[in-house]
Image (spheres, coloured by chain):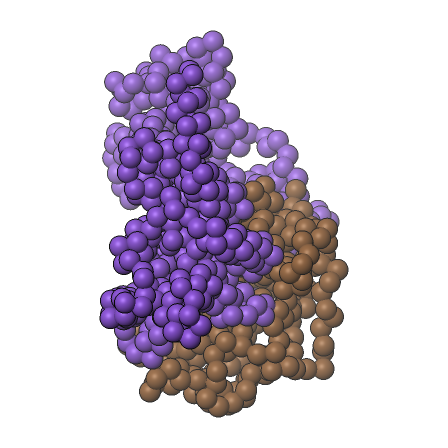
């Protein structure tokens, strides 16, 4: 009954460059106006890690993601993706947006959205070729959305929509996947299924950076955590980051919410 | 019949009518195609602004060509002037909205009025040199299209349409997900300006026909009409072009019939066409939505019926269903017919059976009902009230709520009346790994992963096991390992083992 999920059929995936770390951030400082959004963040993420990015609202998580995508000009410091500066590493980083930021009424089908993952490698005078279509079908299969391929994206449930954007990132075959709150607003079963896709992507050698807000499951889902509050408060394995003292410092009074959160039963297995 | 034919043929005796149809259709096609993207990018207001701002450019272009070269009403000069004023307007708008706290819509309002007003001042101050009637500029005149206008319009149409065709994917992705587009290396800013330029070109070419005030209508109304009918951008553009042409042709006839302004008649026809589609569109129309709502039956009634049919087993007559409902008196036969139409039930000579979809839904409700009953009993609800209260609660059957309830109740096997609670088929049949605690007797599985506190339960990833049943009042999970070893796990340990179900076997009835 359980079908075997291979992840990477994409023949066009570039081989990873093991010599350079997946992501190197040095003294990154970004500010919009007078208040810094990120202050002197330095870290280096190895290949094949599933990394969670946590921190309170306004801690600079989105800014960090934008910096990795090469969008925000940094006041100071540098971001290097696979050894090249972020601004020049276009297409190597696949981005899964927050659900709230998508126009769900856009006249576009599931398949077309996933095909966008291939746009970076299709020259403008050419139509998508057979290998692009195959990569799209494969990505849809991986997230179990093949039967919905011809639906308009607004006609899906929240979890299905999330999986479509995951498929797009897979079709892009980027070595680094950036996901902005992928688990927000999906049910427990979908969360499990999404996590499964993430883990398989990781086993495939990709590096995943996931903005996440649930501290309890953060400890169970990710290999490493980045705890941000403008500065890099902590980076490392969950047991080193999810420490009472650090969390109290970062979340201030809101930590009460953390202590009463019930542990999710749905995840946290080590295979 | 002959009269009708004459009505349609007669206007073509005037040369201006044929020319108006041709020029109007060209403009309408290109307007509508570009308009699709204008709508999706929520730029309708900007389109309006650009059209107004152009009077300054047209006036300035006129003046420049007249004063410097002595040309009168030089079309290309006015076009270029209009483009320059459009670009200037966009730059000013972006400058204000980016450099201050004034938001985009307000800065559009400020800047287009500024440029428009400057244009008015310019045209009226030099009215001895500039022979533009402001009136003409505002409402246009489709019936007096000059050959030169027609030529220019054709060039503009060809240029803009090829832009949209060649860079279709570029415009699609930057409209849908600019962040993604930028991360792939698309020049998002440049494409935005290219698109704004397209809009400006289109608007300039349309102004001479329908005027400043109506041009935004021609830009967005046919596109909006198409948007109500399709879920694909390519088809939307095709349909919009079609609606644009019908608007122009229909509007021109309307104008002739009523002896009114051509531009006005075009927009009236176009808007009526939109309203007709708004009412009648199958999926996104008002009529369709109203009919769908009328066809809807209360969720509770539908679920009660599903459960009644499930309990009846096989085919059930309408009267039997009615007798089983907790709240008799509802219009059961109508509900049954609608549910059959929706694919939940199959009708066979007055008797109803569940379809696969209906069965799935019914099982969910049944499971919820029995879990709720178990819960109600645990919290001390009197036995006489169990069923009635569970009937109310069973309509809450969201997966997450049921998972939680099932877990908190310790995955019970039977409800207070001794009926079996259906297995958690949602997860068991998903093909994804599940917790061992969800397995039912006789199911075989392969261990995928373990976590605390199951490390010393005697299992490791890759082990095959058979669920032998629950013991100790359901609190102990008994499994047999592939080597025949019997193991016992408590609830916490059973939750901590992740397994893949190997094969769904018909389960022997539970004792």
Q: Where is residue A209 shown, x and y percent of the image? A: 54, 71
Q: Where is residue B128 shown, x and y percent of the image? A: 27, 67
When the figure is inspected, residue A57 is found, relative to residue B403, above or below; the finding is below
Q: Nearer the viewer, residue B50 or A123?
A: B50
Q: State the residue lying farthest toward the top.
A: B349
Q: Residue at x 43, y 63 (%)?
A: B74
When the figure is inspected, residue B383 is found, relative to residue B487, above or below; the finding is above
Q: Nearer the viewer, residue A193 or A33?
A: A33
Q: Where is residue B35 shown, x and y percent of the image? A: 43, 52
Q: Is residue B10 visible?
A: yes
Chain with colour brown in the figure: A
Q: Residue at x 42, y 15 (%)?
A: B1
Q: Write down the colour of chain B.
A: purple
Q: Nearer the viewer, residue A113 or B71?
A: B71
Give left or right: position of A67 versus B326: right
Q: Is residue A46 visible?
A: no
Give left or right: position of B428 versus B32: right
Give left or right: position of A53 versus B137: right
Give left or right: position of B224 versus B180: left
Q: Residue at x 71, y 59 (%)?
A: A10
Q: Residue at x 74, y 70 (%)?
A: A15
When the figure is inspected, residue B31 is found, relative to residue A29, above or below; the finding is above
Q: Where is residue B145 shown, x and y percent of the image? A: 42, 48
Q: Would you identify the image quadrant in which residue A61 lies?
A: bottom left
């Amino acid at each position: 009954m359980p079908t075997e999920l291979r992840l990477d059929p994409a023949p066009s995936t570039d081989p990873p460059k093991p010599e350079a770390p997946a992501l190197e951030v040095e003294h990154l400082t970004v500010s919009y106006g007078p208040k810094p959004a990120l202050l002197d963040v330095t870290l280096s993420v190895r290949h094949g890690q599933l990394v969670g990015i946590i921190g309170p609202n306004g801690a600079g998580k989105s800014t960090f993601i934008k910096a990795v995508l090469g969008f925000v000009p940094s006041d100071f410091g540098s971001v290097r993706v696979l050894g090249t500066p972020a601004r020049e590493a276009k297409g190597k980083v696949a981005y899964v947006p927050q659900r709230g930021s998508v126009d769900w009424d856009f006249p576009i089908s599931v398949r077309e959205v996933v095909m966008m993952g291939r746009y970076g490698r299709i020259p403008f005078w050419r139509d998508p070729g057979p290998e692009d279509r195959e990569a799209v079908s494969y990505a849809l299969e991986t997230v179990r959305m093949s039967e919905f391929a011809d639906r308009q994206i607004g006609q899906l449930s929240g979890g299905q929509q999330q999986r479509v954007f995951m498929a797009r990132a897979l079709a892009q075959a980027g070595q680094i996947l950036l996901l902005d709150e992928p688990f927000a607003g999906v049910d427990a079963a979908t969360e499990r299924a999404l996590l499964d896709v993430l883990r398989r992507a990781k086993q495939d050698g990709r590096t995943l950076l996931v903005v996440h807000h649930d501290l309890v499951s953060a400890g169970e889902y990710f290999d490493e955590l980045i705890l941000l509050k403008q500065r890099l408060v902590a980076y490392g394995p969950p047991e080193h980051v999810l420490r009472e003292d650090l969390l109290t410092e970062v979340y201030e009074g809101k930590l009460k919410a953390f202590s009463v959160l019930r542990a999710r039963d749905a995840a946290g297995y080590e295979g | 019949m002959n009269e009708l034919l004459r009505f349609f043929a007669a206007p073509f005796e005037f040369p201006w009518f044929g020319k108006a149809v041709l020029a109007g259709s060209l403009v309408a096609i290109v307007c509508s195609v570009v308009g699709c993207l204008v709508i999706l990018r929520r730029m309708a207001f900007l389109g309006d602004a650009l059209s107004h701002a152009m009077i300054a450019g047209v006036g300035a272009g006129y003046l420049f060509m007249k004063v410097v070269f002595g040309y009168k009403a030089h079309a290309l000069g006015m076009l270029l002037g209009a483009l320059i004023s459009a670009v200037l307007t966009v730059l000013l708008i972006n400058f204000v909205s980016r450099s201050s706290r004034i938001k985009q819509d307000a800065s559009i309002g400020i800047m287009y009025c500024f440029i428009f007003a400057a244009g008015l001042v310019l045209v009226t101050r030099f009215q001895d040199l500039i022979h533009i009637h402001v009136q003409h500029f505002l409402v246009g005149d489709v019936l007096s299209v000059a050959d030169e206008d027609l030529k220019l319009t054709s060039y503009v149409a060809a240029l803009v349409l090829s832009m949209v065709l060649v860079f279709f994917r570029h415009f699609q992705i930057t409209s849908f997900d600019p962040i993604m587009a930028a991360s792939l290396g698309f020049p998002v800013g440049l494409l935005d300006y290219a698109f704004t330029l397209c809009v400006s070109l289109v608007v300039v070419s349309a102004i001479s026909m329908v005027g400043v005030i109506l041009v935004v209508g021609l830009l967005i109304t046919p596109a909006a009409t198409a948007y109500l009918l399709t879920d694909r951008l390519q088809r939307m553009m095709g349909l919009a072009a079609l609606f644009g042409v019908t608007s122009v042709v229909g509007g021109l006839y309307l104008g002739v019939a009523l002896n009114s302004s051509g531009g006005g008649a075009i927009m009236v026809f176009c808007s009526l066409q939109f309203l007709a589609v708004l009412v009648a569109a199958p999926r996104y129309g008002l009529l369709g939505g109203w009919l769908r709502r009328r066809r809807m039956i209360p969720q509770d009634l539908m679920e009660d019926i599903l459960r009644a049919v499930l309990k009846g087993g096989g085919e059930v007559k309408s009267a039997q269903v009615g007798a089983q409902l907790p709240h008799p008196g509802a219009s059961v036969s109508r509900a049954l017919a609608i549910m059959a139409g929706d694919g939940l039930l199959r009708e066979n000579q007055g008797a109803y059976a569940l379809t696969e979809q209906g069965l799935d839904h019914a099982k969910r409700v049944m499971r919820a009902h029995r879990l709720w009953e178990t819960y109600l009993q645990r919290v001390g609800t009197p036995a006489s009230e169990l069923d009635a209260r569970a009937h109310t609660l069973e309509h809450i059957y969201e997966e997450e709520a049921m998972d939680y309830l099932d877990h908190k109740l310790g995955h019970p096997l039977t409800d207070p009346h001794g009926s079996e609670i259906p297995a958690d088929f949602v997860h068991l049949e998903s093909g994804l790994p599940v917790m061992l605690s969800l397995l039912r007797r006789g199911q075989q599985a392969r261990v995928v992963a373990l976590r605390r506190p199951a490390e010393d339960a005697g299992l490791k990833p890759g082990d095959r096991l058979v669920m032998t049943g629950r013991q100790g009042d359901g609190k102990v999970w008994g499994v047999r390992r592939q080597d025949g070893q019997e193991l016992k796990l408590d609830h916490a340990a059973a939750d901590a083992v992740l397994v893949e179900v190997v094969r769904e076997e018909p389960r022997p009835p539970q004792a």
